[in-house]
Image: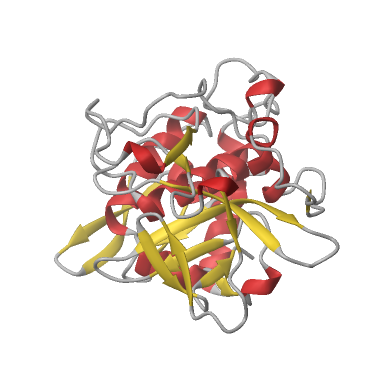
Amino acid sequence: MNLTSFSASLAGLLAAALFQLPAPATHPYPWLTAAPAPGHALAARFAPPPGCQRVAVPAGSWGAWLRGLPLRPASTPAHLYNGKLKDNQAVVAAVVDIDPGTKDLQQCADAVMRLRAEYLFSQNVNKIHFHLTTGYDAWFSDYIAGRTFQVKGEEVTAAPKPAEAPTHAALQRYLLPVFGYAGTLSLRRELRPVPLPEVRPGDVLIHGGRPGHAVLVADVAENPRTGQRYLLLAQSYMPAQNIHVLRNVAQPALGAWFAVPAPDEAEVETPEWTFAREELGRFE
């Protein structure tokens, strides 16, 4: 076990000793006060393209959780963190029922990290961690045990803070500085490269850079006769804004689904970014 893993394990044990871990949430979307109505789930709103069926995912998995994402009512516009409307509403097929925050922080990669953190919070809080752009590994278990980080110039070091219970409010406080010092560069390094034909729900199209962009693969469907796969994509953008399911403005007949490009196509086009086909990654 390396020092980082030992530190995270020790922090998790300390937090468990200091606080009684909360009872499992009554539903897997802990930012909501009540369980979402099944009819508002992503999978209920977006049926697969004709002749297709959703690819199989294990119950309780990241991909299954994304299929259940609660959506706001149809035709809800996407707003920025400051309440203003997103400029390009034409790309918005649906808005995920989750807050964008009140600061210009929850942008593209941050939205992916937000959803991943929320999923892990509903499963096992001791698995929540993200690397900053500097490489510093920020664990939620460290944060609740009384250790955060501080930034001086280009140096990131551990810093003390009061220990606290592993509540959802603590998760939100933990994520704010992570959003500030992580991004597409760091998230790309955390993801394992995956061949595009093997895409599955929960994978991420990501271009690390300044600027960069990240789009989450929220669902995958396949035509069993032809093998053609289709993607449902979700993103935030700049400025920070509601996480939204993307509309296929280039091929309106597909609605919100995007066909996986053929092997001889070098790029994956989304409404507000074009990715190289090699820019697909997966959380371990």
* Rendered position, 193 above or below 88: below
Q: How many marks?
A: 0
Percent coordinates x, y for residue 92 in the rendering: 42, 38
Image check: 10 left or right of 44? left
Instruction: Identify the residue at horizontal 54%, vertical 22% (top origin).
Output: 32
Does residue 251 appear in the picture of this structure? yes
The residue lying furthest to the top in this view is: 34
Q: Report the colour scheme.
A: secondary structure
Nearest the viewer among 3 and 137 is 137
Question: From the viewer's perspective, is residue 244 above or below residue 157?
Answer: above
Residue drawn at (41%, 35%), measured in percent from left and top?
172
Percent position of residue 105, x then y: 28, 44
At 45% from the left and 64% from the top, the residue drawn is: 269
**Residue 1 in sight in this render:** no
Position of residue 261 relative to residue 283, above or below, is below
Q: Is residue 9 above or below residue 98?
A: below
Q: Residue at x 60, y 30 (%)?
A: 29
The one of 271 and 42 positioned closer to us in this rendering = 271
Q: Quadrant of the N terminus?
A: bottom right
Residue 189: percent from the left, percent from the top? 46, 73
Residue 134 coordinates in the image, percent (x, y)? 31, 70
Residue extending furthest front?
Answer: 253
Name the quarter where the C terminus is drawn: bottom right
Quick check: 209 left or right of 68? left
Direction right: furthest residue: 225
Work out which residue is located at the far left of the displayed protein and give it.
153
Of 3 and 192, nearer the camera is 192
- Residue nearer the viewer, 226 or 112: 226
